[in-house]
Image (cartoon, helix red, strand yellow):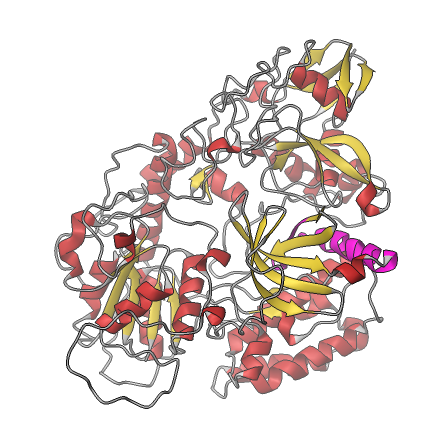
């Protein structure tokens, strides 16, 4: 059965793919919009089951179904959405609807309603009993089911139990996002991309170059190991759900970081290993090494800690099959996927070499194949490589691994030829950068974008512009994607309106002079000389000017670099740059703030604080400005004033006065997560106006944490010094805004809630 998942959200798509695979549905495809859905159907010779987002673009889900039915009369459809669809209930026309997040039970029930059998177990058919309503099937054992809580970073609003059933209730309360397109009232016309006639049962795909590689189908997760003492319990702020892997000194767990609702993989050092000082130091050193890796194609280490004698560190968990899964299940990969793997490995290992980061050797289980995305690698960094790695030999091993996995079709010839070229490279030319470039040059190119696609993209852009300008307007008018026409002038006008900031550019770099005075910090009375500190946190637009100036000049970049900064280190923040290795490219947060005013489904403007910067980035910017980072004592003096207040405005906490995490939520509903301070995540650096200290310094109680110039010894790390950050952020629920003090594992770590401001000596 050919199944196509057409959702705009890649995380939900991947989770759904895992659930379908667990139910025995292996012939899967993913599409982010209706154009991609039609292209997939053309290429794969039809479709048996379509699972579509109602508010799809440029055609909504209902219109896509109506356009396909003349060609695919036996097509079965399931609709889904995190939004309220009560105005369009009649357009379901009997099709099941799944509220999000989608559970395995509701999915199985919808499939049963459509007469689609659970193929996960090959049990012999039982004699047919008298007709009776059947309960929703349970497709797999609980230990083997993929858990949506462990992979979905953007949970929808809590809904009544009835809302999770196969059919929605008209009283559903969740509201559609402003960008959602209203389904058309009538039957849609033929899609903008011509739908080729597909005979029922046709098996020959239409030959068509694809820009994005079709990753290997998602595979069911391996069953968890038997439970141990931690499963089902809490370690610090992590709820441990299942054991993933057991090693001699460590155990890997799937867990949820409860204070921010983030799924993680938790690596816990076993008590016997922690008792050995050498093993404990190696564990901590490896965590620090992994924290230095900031490449977008490598899983991220979040934090390391110790709680009641238990040592751990958490890192990103990716719901995706590995290349090892493909091999063990006897699967094949297509040519674009093979080339993308080579490109990913080449780019990542070239980064490791440039940053002088030691790593372990590559294995098939380290390569993650998430459908619809570029392949990624697990974090292979370590404090000291166990054995020296021979680069030419490792490249040869990679090629030898991929060759037998290529599917036997016409497109594989190019990939096989490319692999041969790589194998035949002279040792001195056999570099990771060289093979990445060679693989990229042989990838299929995207077909020309037609006028309909250009129009639909323009419509989406204008919708995003209007969203940001109206900022969570309550009664949004929803337009159909295929009914609007836009002019170039309108697009240009809307784009220009977005590039403006709410702060006068002259005010962004304004400095506030703080008189000399005394503070009590960590139990000590300290005198702080007079100094100046920036009134606002450094904004995105300011940091962009810095990058533009130093990126084109090696001499300028060296002039602002810290003496201990690794050679060749980039100052581009994590998440800032466009991911051009994807097709189509995925814009980074700078492009999104500049062009659309939104990032991660929330408003983000150019006058929001820069984030994703490590300590060396903050140091370099400050030096470029002829300034420096404030010391921890200076920061606290500027925030607490002469009276040593607990918060910039006084001693009592008020969650409406600063952009803190007192109302933080991942719920996409714009009403949720901004009810206290008016902002779901980042705010412009001059807002809220009430977050101001007695000296007139803005934003020290929230928005983002801020790097300082101070370093502190960490007893847990054997006395190693680590940089200190101060303040609170949009995701910090605690009420210790001006008193909060924290450290990172290393100066290389960054965070989407961590920025900085600058300081200088008083005249």
Relative to residue 699, is residue 454 depicted above or below?
below
The C terminus, quarter of image? top right
Specify whether 457 is left or right of 665. Answer: left
Residue 258 location in percent, x, y?
54, 46
Residues in magenta?
277-303
Camera-side residue: 467 or 730? 730
Camera-side residue: 512 or 109? 109
Looking at the image, which residue is at 26% across and 43% down? 173
Looking at the image, which residue is at 23% across and 44% down? 479
Is residue 451 covered in magenta? no
The image quadrant that residue 679 belongs to is top left
Marker count (numbered): 0
Camera-side residue: 450 or 638? 638
Residue 453 location in percent, x, y?
33, 56
Camera-side residue: 407 or 694? 694
The image quadrant that residue 437 belongs to is bottom right
Residue 336 location in percent, x, y?
52, 74
Relative to residue 496, is residue 33 depicted above or below?
below
């Amino acid at each position: 059965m050919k199944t196509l998942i057409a959702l705009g959200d890649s995380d939900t798509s991947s989770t759904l793919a895992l659930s379908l695979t667990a139910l025995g549905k292996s012939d899967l495809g993913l599409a982010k919009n209706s154009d991609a859905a039609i292209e997939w159907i053309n290429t794969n010779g039809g479709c048996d089951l379509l699972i579509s987002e109602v508010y799809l673009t440029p055609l909504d889900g209902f219109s896509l179904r109506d356009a396909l039915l003349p060609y695919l009369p036996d097509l079965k459809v399931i609709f889904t959405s995190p939004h309220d669809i009560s105005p369009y209930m009649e357009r379901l026309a009997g099709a099941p609807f799944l509220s999000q997040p989608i559970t395995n039970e509701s999915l199985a029930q919808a499939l049963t309603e459509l007469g689609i059998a659970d193929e996960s177990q090959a049990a012999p058919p039982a004699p047919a009993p008298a007709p009776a309503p059947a309960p929703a099937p349970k497709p797999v054992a609980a230990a083997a089911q993929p858990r949506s809580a462990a992979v979905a970073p953007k949970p929808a609003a809590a809904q009544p139990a009835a809302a999770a059933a196969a059919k929605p209730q008209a009283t559903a309360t969740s509201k559609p996002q402003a960008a959602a397109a209203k389904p058309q009232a009538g039957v849609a016309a033929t899609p903008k991309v011509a739908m080729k006639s597909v005979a029922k049962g046709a098996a020959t795909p239409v030959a068509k170059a694809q820009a994005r590689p079709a990753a290997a189908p998602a595979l069911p997760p391996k069953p968890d190991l038997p439970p141990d003492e931690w499963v089902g319990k809490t370690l610090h702020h992590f709820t441990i759900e299942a054991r993933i892997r057991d090693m001699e000194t460590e155990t890997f767990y799937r867990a949820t970081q409860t204070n921010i609702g983030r799924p993680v993989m938790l690596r816990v050092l076993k008590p016997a290993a922690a008792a050995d000082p050498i093993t404990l130091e190696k564990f901590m050193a490896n965590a620090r090494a992994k924290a230095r890796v900031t490449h977008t194609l490598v899983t991220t280490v979040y934090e390391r800690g110790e709680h009641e004698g238990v040592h751990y560190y958490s890192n990103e968990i990716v719901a995706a099959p590995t290349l090892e899964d493909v091999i063990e299940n006897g699967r094949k990969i297509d040519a674009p996927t093979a080339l993308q793997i080579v490109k990913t490995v080449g780019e990542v290992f070239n980064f490791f070499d440039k940053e002088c980061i030691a790593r372990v050797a590559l294995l098939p289980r380290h390569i993650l194949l998430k459908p619809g995305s570029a392949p990624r690698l697990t974090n292979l960094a370590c404090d000291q490589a166990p054995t020296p790695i021979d680069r030419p030999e490792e490249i040869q091993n990679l090629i030898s691994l991929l060759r037998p996995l290529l599917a036997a079709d016409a497109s594989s010839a190019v990939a096989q030829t490319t692999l041969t070229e790589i194998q035949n490279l002279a040792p001195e030319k056999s570099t990771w950068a060289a093979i990445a470039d060679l693989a990229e040059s042989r990838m299929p190119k995207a077909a020309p974008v037609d006028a309909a696609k250009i129009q639909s993209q323009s419509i989406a852009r204008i919708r995003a512009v209007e969203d940001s300008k109206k900022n969570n307007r309550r009664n949004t008018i929803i337009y159909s994607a295929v009914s609007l026409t836009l002019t170039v002038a309108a697009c240009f006008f809307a784009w220009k309106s977005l590039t403006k900031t709410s702060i006068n550019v002259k005010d962004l770099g304004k400095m506030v002079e703080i008189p000399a005075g005394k503070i009590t910090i960590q139990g000590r009375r300290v005198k702080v000389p007079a100094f100046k500190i920036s009134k606002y946190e450094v904004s995105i637009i300011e940091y962009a000017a810095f990058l533009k100036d130093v990126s084109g000049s090696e001499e300028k970049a060296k002039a602002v670099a810290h003496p201990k900064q690794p050679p060749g280190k980039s100052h581009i923040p994590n998440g800032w740059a466009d991911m051009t290795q994807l097709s189509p490219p995925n814009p980074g947060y700078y492009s999104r703030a500049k062009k659309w005013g939104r990032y991660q489904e929330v408003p983000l403007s150019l006058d929001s604080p820069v984030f994703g910067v490590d300590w060396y980035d903050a140091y370099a910017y400050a030096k470029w400005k002829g300034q420096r980072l404030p010391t921890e004592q200076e920061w606290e003096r500027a925030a607490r004033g002469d009276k040593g207040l607990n918060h910039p405005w006084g001693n009592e906490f008020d969650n409406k006065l600063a952009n803190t995490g007192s109302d933080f939520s991942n719920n996409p509903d714009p009403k949720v997560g901004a009810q206290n301070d008016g902002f779901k995540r980042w705010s412009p650096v001059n807002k809220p106006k009430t977050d101001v200290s007695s000296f007139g310094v803005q934003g020290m109680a929230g928005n983002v944490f801020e790097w300082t110039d101070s370093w502190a010894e960490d007893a847990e790390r054997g006395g190693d010094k680590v940089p200190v950050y101060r303040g609170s952020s949009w995701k910090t629920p605690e009420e210790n805004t001006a008193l909060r003090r924290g450290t990172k594992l290393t100066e290389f770590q960054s965070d989407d809630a961590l920025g900085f401001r600058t300081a200088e000596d008083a005249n």
